[in-house]
Amino acid sequence: MSSRTLPRRLADHGATYQNLVDEARFELAEIPFLTGFSAQSAFTRAFKCWAGKTPGAFRSQPRA
């Protein structure tokens, strides 16, 4: 798909790339608070203790 096709197809569905990015960021930002952490940094520290890496590093690793 070309770089011009994606925005057109998103527009056909009433969306933009930036709207989708913002929505994903908002949903990810809610996770620490929904799990009882007072701040994103507290969640990141706890996650690093549990998984040995930050949430971002964990998400970017290849999946089996």
Image: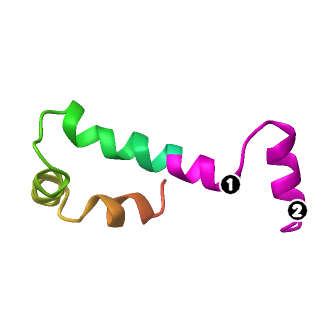
Look at 11% across and 59% down and name the residue there. 45
Q: Which residue is mark 2?
A: 1
Up-down relation of residue 16 to residue 13 (above or below)? below
Residue at (14%, 49%) from the top-left corner?
39
> Residue at 61% of width from left, 48% of height from top?
19
> Quadrant of the rendered structure where residue 17 is?
bottom right
Magenta segment, which residues? 2-22
Q: Count neighbours of disc 1 (C-alpha within 10 A) and say few if under 14, some if 14 to 19, many if 20 or more.
A: few
Q: Amino acid at mark 1?
A: Tyr
Q: Secondary structure at mark 1?
A: helix
**Place of residue 43 in the rendered image (x, y in percent of width and height, measured from the top left):** 16, 50
Q: Dot 2: what SS? A: loop
Q: Which mark is residue 17?
A: 1
Query: Nearest the camera: 49 or 23?
Result: 23
Judge whether residue 16 is colored magenta. Answer: yes
Gap between marks 1 and 2 measured at Cα: 14 Å
**Amino acid type at mark 2:** Met
Query: Is 43 on the left-hand or right-hand side of 4?
Result: left
